Image (spheres, rainbow, N blue to C red):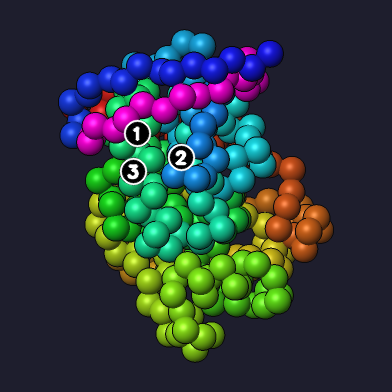
């Protein structure tokens, strides 16, 4: 049975803006409580662990929160909250980042979450995670990504242009045409320097034969560019290579290491 509840608003000391509390619908999420709600017309939720870890650390899923949730399930057991607002179709555009800002204000005020989140991205969610981290590095503890898109010129430009994502890119970024998309210099690959300067820890799980979001054009190119700034990505390559969905999907690997990575960089009290 689902219950309607309003979580009380909290006053916290990390500088989050006050936000009006929202009514939530409660349901079970792997033994924890998932509190779902609408945020500015977008589906959203916060998973509340049974026993909250000190400092209220949290994972912020930027896309597809039900896909490869094994790492999240382990972190909830460790006292992490999981939060998500569905702006995936906006592909990390400025409008998406602004909604994410207001969502962050809400979840920090209503649930008392830590100042810095562990951003967790799947596929196109890499656009949201990296563009957010580059422009707001003081709000990000680390990034853990699964086959992330790092360049609109790789995806969706090389995908089927009659389908939604390509048209979404033109719409939400305000590109007049394909030439404007190609000329855009705000892709994650283009704006890695602030992330390197902030020394934000990065970990990617990828497939070497991914034909949807090719590793060479995305994760491995990002790694090469970051190394020029004195930083890098911890890259875990699936072996043996997968053939599911053009190599883009695979049974998740490296789960214990990914859990440890997020716990190390986003767990416990912050700002000490």
* Marks 2/1: CA–CA distance: 9 Å
Query: Counting other residues with Cα less than 10 Å from the Cα at mark 1, is it few (<14), some (14-19), or many (20 or more)?
Result: many
Which one is in front, 2 or 186? 2
Q: Position of residue 266 (x, y in %)?
A: 37, 33
Horizontal side of 14 relative to 121 (left or right) equals: left
Q: Are marks 1 and 3 in contact (CB under 8 Å)?
A: yes
Which one is in front, 175 or 5? 5
* Marks 3/2: CA–CA distance: 9 Å
State the residue at coordinates (24%, 32%).
18
- Mark number for residue 115? none
Which one is in front, 233 or 189? 189
Q: Which residue is mark 1?
A: 106
* Marks 1/3: CA–CA distance: 6 Å
Which secondary structure lies at badge 1? helix
Which secondary structure lies at badge 2? strand
Q: Are marks 2 and 1 in contact (CB under 8 Å)?
A: yes
Q: Position of residue 55 (x, y in %)?
A: 31, 21
Q: Which residue is mark 2?
A: 39
Q: Is residue 72 visible?
A: yes
Q: Quadrant of residue 77?
A: top right
Q: In this rendering, is residue 33 above or below 14?
A: above
Q: Quadrant of residue 157?
A: bottom right
Query: Counting other residues with Cα less than 10 Å from the Cα at mark 3, is it few (<14), some (14-19), or many (20 or more)?
Result: some
Q: Is residue 17 magenta?
A: yes
Q: Nearer the viewer, mark 2 or mark 1?
A: 2
Q: Are marks 3 and 2 in contact (CB under 8 Å)?
A: yes
- Mark number for residue 102? 3
Range covered by the magenta-colored residues: 16-33
């Amino acid at each position: 049975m689902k219950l309607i509840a309003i979580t009380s608003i909290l006053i916290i000391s990390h500088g989050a803006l006050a936000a009006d509390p929202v009514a939530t619908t409660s349901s079970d999420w792997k033994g924890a409580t998932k509190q779902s709600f609408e945020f500015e017309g977008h589906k959203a939720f916060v998973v509340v662990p049974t026993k909250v870890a000190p400092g209220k650390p949290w994972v912020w899923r930027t896309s597809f929160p039900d896909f490869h949730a094994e790492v999240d399930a382990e972190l909830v057991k460790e006292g992490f909250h999981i939060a998500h607002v569905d702006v995936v179709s906006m592909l990390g555009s400025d409008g998406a980042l602004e909604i994410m800002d207001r969502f962050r204000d809400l979840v920090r005020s209503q649930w008392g979450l830590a100042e810095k989140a562990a951003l967790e991205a799947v596929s196109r969610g890499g656009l949201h995670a990296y563009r957010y981290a580059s422009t707001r590095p003081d709000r990000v503890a680390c990034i853990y990504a699964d086959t992330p898109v790092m360049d609109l010129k790789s995806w969706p430009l090389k995908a089927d242009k009659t389908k939604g994502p390509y048209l979404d890119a033109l719409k939400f970024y305000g590109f007049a045409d394909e030439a404007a998309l190609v000329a855009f210099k705000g892709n994650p690959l283009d704006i890695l320097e602030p992330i390197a300067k902030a020394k934000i820890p990065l970990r990617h799980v990828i497939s070497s034969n991914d034909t949807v979001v090719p590793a060479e054009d995305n994760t491995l190119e990002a790694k090469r560019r970051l190394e020029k700034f004195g930083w890098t990505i911890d890259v875990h390559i699936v072996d043996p290579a997968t053939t599911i969905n053009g190599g883009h999907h695979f049974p998740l690997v490296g789960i214990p290491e990914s859990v440890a990575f997020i716990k190390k960089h986003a767990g416990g009290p912050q700002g000490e």
